[in-house]
Image: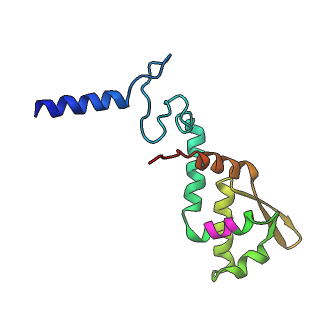
């Protein structure tokens, strides 16, 4: 029993050994990145709040589909978005307003229609966060 506990303690210490030149342990896991170099470790609270609002907006399947439609083109008229969904125009407008409030899209009224486009900086922020992957070796 006592030997098992010391073996577990040794494994934990080995997994969290200090990175040379720092006082922080490594994160362990698949790539062993340090807390300082791990891509999410440096995520500021304001950035996390902004990204969380984006993910929350995209958490609704209809909004996710709308975002995919808008992001696939330079701009898209609301008259092209509405027929793609079996929803009232008021509900479509609500979903677009939510995407806009989250900073994912922007729009401009031209005559009686509103044209929407994806915000490149928002897409870049999401891609940067999701683009960091550890390569697992077997």
Residue pictured at 69% horizontal, 80% vertical: 84
**Residue 61 rendering spot, x and y as whole percentages:** 56, 70
Residue 65 counted in the magenta span: yes
Which of the 4 image quadrants contains residue 114?
Answer: bottom right
**Residue extending furthest toward the top:** 21
| Residue found at x 56% / y 43% | 48
Residue drawn at x 73%, y 75% is 81
Camera-side residue of 138 and 11 = 138
Give the image location of residue 9, x and y in percent. 25, 29
Which residue is at a point 72% across and 58% down the rendered structure image?
105
Q: Nearer the viewer, residue 25 or 54?
A: 25
Work out whether residue 27 or residue 31 is closer to the camera in this orientation and state it.
Answer: 31
Please identify the dominant SS of the magenta region: helix
Magenta extent: 64-68
Q: In this view, does 12 lie to the left or right of 90?
A: left
Residue furthest left as drawn: 1
Q: How many marks?
A: 0
Residue sitting nearer the eye, 24 or 102: 24
């Amino acid at each position: 029993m006592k030997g098992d506990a010391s073996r577990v303690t040794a494994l934990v210490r080995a997994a969290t050994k200090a990175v040379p030149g720092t006082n922080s342990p490594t994160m362990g896991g698949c790539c062993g990145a340090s807390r300082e170099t791990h891509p999410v470790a440096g995520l500021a609270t304001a950035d996390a709040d902004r990204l969380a609002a984006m993910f929350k907006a995209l958490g609704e399947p209809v909004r996710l589909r709308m975002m995919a439609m808008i992001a696939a083109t330079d701009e898209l008229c609301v008259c092209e978005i509405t027929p793609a969904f079996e929803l009232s125009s008021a509900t479509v407008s609500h979903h677009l307003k939510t995407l806009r409030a989250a900073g994912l899209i922007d729009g401009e009224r031209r005559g009686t229609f509103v044209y929407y486009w994806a915000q490149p900086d928002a897409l870049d922020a999401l891609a940067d966060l999701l683009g960091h992957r550890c390569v697992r070796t077997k």
